[in-house]
Image (cartoon, helix red, strand yellow):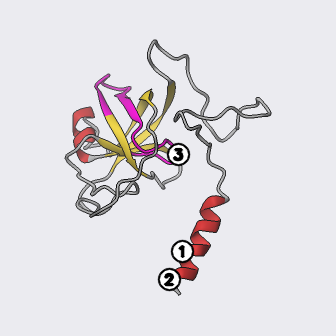
Amino acid sequence: MRSLVLALFAIVWGCSSSPRFTKEGGPSRSTTGGASSSKPAPLAARSGVLLTLEGVASYYADDFHGKQAANGEVFDMNALTAAHRTFPFGTEVRVTNLFNKKSVVVRVNDRGPFKEGRLIDLSLRAAKDLEIIGAGTANVRLEVLRWGDGTLHHRK
């Protein structure tokens, strides 16, 4: 039964309409050249910034602390990490709270957020550094500083 459920999940997940990434880690170019209406349009990139997006950030902590993240690591709510739906694992992102201009650099090691309208889920430490704990969410700017290679970590 478990094998059937895993196979079904793999089929459904494989059919999702997420952006694809090249071996170099960056987004692949569309053959049509058109932008997807469901994907936020990048803002003008700054020097050294590979992609800039704006949206809503949230955070996750206690319920997931010590459990396995999507890349195989053990989630540490006190580390500077984040969950993103499509960025390759290992991608380094500067996240800036647009209200107070505080920023932090996080590494993508998990998948999410799964709540509609959210762009990134931050670890508790990152959320504290950005001062979004009280509100729970914040409008943020994401700046990709380095594309990850998507490496999975295997538990021993």
Residue beneath disc 3: 86
Measure how far apart labels 2 and 1 are at the Cα level: 6 Å
Residue at 42% x, 47% y is 151
Q: How many marks?
A: 3
Q: Characterize the local packing of mark 3: few (<14), some (14-19) or many (20 or more) Cα atoms within 10 angstroms.
A: some
Q: Range of the magenta residues?
A: 83-105
Of the image marks 1 and 3, the number of the one nearer the N terminus: 1
Q: Amino acid at mark 1?
A: Leu
Left or right, 41 with respect to 59, comes to right
- Could you say whether the residue bearing mark 1 is in a helix, strand or loop? helix
Left or right, 113 with respect to 127, comes to right
**Was residue 96 drawn as part of the magenta stretch in this picture?**
yes
Residue beneath disc 2: 2
Residue at 40% x, 52% y is 152
Q: Position of residue 73 (x, y in %)?
A: 31, 55
Residue beneath disc 1: 6
Residue at 39% x, 32% y is 93
Q: Characterize the local packing of mark 1: few (<14), some (14-19) or many (20 or more) Cα atoms within 10 angstroms.
A: few
